[in-house]
Amino acid sequence: MELDTTPPTAGPMNPAETSITASSRSRRGWWRDAVIYQVYVRSFADSDGDGDGDLTGIRQRLEHLASLGVDALWLTPFYVSPLADGGYDVANYRDVDPRFGTLEDFDALLARAHELGLRVIIDIVPNHTSSAHPWFVEALASAPGSPARDRYIFRPGRGANGELPPNDWDSIFGGPAWTRVRNPDGTPGEWYLHLFDVEQPDLNWKNPEVAEEFLSILRFWLDRGVDGFRIDVAHGMIKQDGLPDVGRPQAKLLGALELPYFDQDGVHEIYRSWRRLLDSYPGERIAVAEAWVNDPVRAARYLRPDELHQAFNFDYLTSDWDAEELRKVIDASLAANAAVDAPTTWVLSNHDVTRHVTRYGGGEIGQRRARAAALLTLALPGSAYIYQGEELGLPEVTDLPESVLQDPTWVRSGYTERGRDGCRVPIPWEGDAPPFGFSPPGSTTWLPIPESWRSITVASQEKDPSSMLHLYRRALAVRRQHPALGDGTLEWVDAPVDVLAFTREPGFTCVVNFRPEPVELSVRGEVLVASEPVQIMETGAGSRLVLPSDTACWLSTQPVQLP
Ligand code: GLC
């Protein structure tokens, strides 16, 4: 098996011309190549011992993120909430839930992050509120047809006595997407729409008051200094007129089906108004869409120049560990985004999906593949997201006791789907026993941390130069310094089956072996970082790289000043 990664036109380069620093990189907007670290607030660090992570805990651990080498963090919702869906059920968008701290704690966290050079993006949840939100409480107490009800999606039921839901839409968490309410006098009344949990009524975005309220909420946080927003269910806010039946059971977040409640054209109008607001603030404030749409071309519509800055690349996240499949997704994403001049994002895990170490096979093989995937991901053109704990190689916790499960999926699926708690287990920081420095000693964490995580705490990985943590640090440091990485383009190099290889200019090559056995390649350049030990052998016929199974390697074909 041979791979010649020599770029066709490359000759010997003049080191004086090619030695670089980060400042020489083209900067067309910080988000175009930012590495953004997702903090799941409830599970990052608990400063007060109540077992839930909090904003002060995050502030106290910010050095971990600064030393990791990321550019920004995204905080999942920390607003006042009954936590029926982990905080994606917001009762007050302008305050912090007491479990997570106070507005002053938020300001202190933001200030410290900025001091460390880290930008901060917060989550905004515009598709639905909590049923505890004053607007919904008012709607329930008001008559059908009232202005208070019109902020949500109330409809009379079908059937002789309105006893059937208004249409056949399913909740993403299982069961119907409609719940019937009682009138103030106790008689059965209208139904309200909730695409997610019963406690997450969908807002009516065709009501101008709703649109105004969210612009005002965005202003509230922009004025406090946030650098942007992650938009929850960004494809869901507008429902097709008439709320037509789908006609069959519906897919979960990502399915091949076109749905009358997702990805409707009207959402783009909302984002144009949001973009105008973001652009009216100094300092490049951004928005990233959580839009589970099927087709990269549809996803790119959210990124037209007058709309949002980024969208999560869920096609990449949902790909198997398979060279051909990944290459197709990479090509399709790059092409679709290039058409709207938007950067692509690359994401392997988040708080809604099984952690990728486990998706890729778990155990030793899952770890190897996750290491290789990290290098592949961070070498691709555009911006990358890291989900907290992936830099430690945390696996999904698949054996949480049923008594602790909190994801509404568990109940709404009739106790058949355990839901997403297994990827939300708190971070193990240090020590030999739970709570591993996540909470003060003796605290009970909201989800139990496996005893076995003692060997993968941050502190133990600090001591091990071959750990996942060191791999991420090294890769992020190289990515920051190398002029070929971040925004830009890539060029595929012919490679054997089950090997991906691409170059980026100037002078960078990434090779990934997806095979179960090593592959020997003829290469040019020096190893910058590899996910497993690799060796380059000089032979009479040039350099040979032996790339072990499930391994990725970055090579530099020009001299660069790297850390
Ligand atoms: C998004 C969030 C998820 C939440 C849902 C409803 O998909 O990422 O955690 O349950 O929206 O708000």
Image (spheres, rainbow, N blue to C red):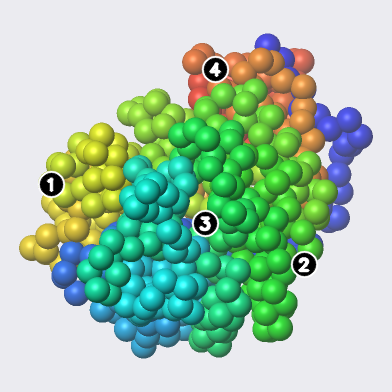
User: What's the residue type where badge 3 is placed?
Assistant: Val
Q: Nearer the viewer, mark 2 or mark 4?
A: 2
Q: Which residue is mark 4?
A: 515
Q: Residue 541: percent from the left, percent from the top?
A: 76, 15
Secondary structure at numbered mark 3: loop
Task: Name the amino acid, label 1.
Answer: Ser
Q: Which residue is mark 2?
A: 306
Q: CA distance from mark 1 to mark 2?
A: 47 Å
Quarter of the image where the C terminus is located: bottom right
Q: Nearest to the eye among marks 3 and 1: give it.
A: 3
Up the image or down, 263 lies above or below 532; here it is: below
Identified at 52% across, 85% down, the residue is: 220
| Residue 161 x/y as whole percent | 34, 52
Mark 3 or mark 4: which comes first in sequence? 3
Mark 2 or 3: in front is 3
| Badge 1 or badge 2: first in the primary sequence | 2
Q: Secondary structure at mark 2?
A: loop
Looking at the image, can residue 100 be seen?
no
Answer left or right for 122 relative to 554: left
Mark 2 and mark 3 lie on one chain; the one further toward the N terminus is 3
Earlier in the chain: of badge 3 and badge 1, it is 3
The residue to which callout 3 is attached is 233
Identify the residue shown where x is 52% and y is 50%.
474
Q: Residues within 10 Å of mark 1 (few under 14, many from 20)?
A: few
Dot 3 beta carbon under 8 Å from ligand 1: yes
User: Seen from this angle, which residue lies furthest right?
Assistant: 9
* Residue located at (66% from left, 15% from top): 497
C-alpha distance separating marks 1 and 4: 41 Å
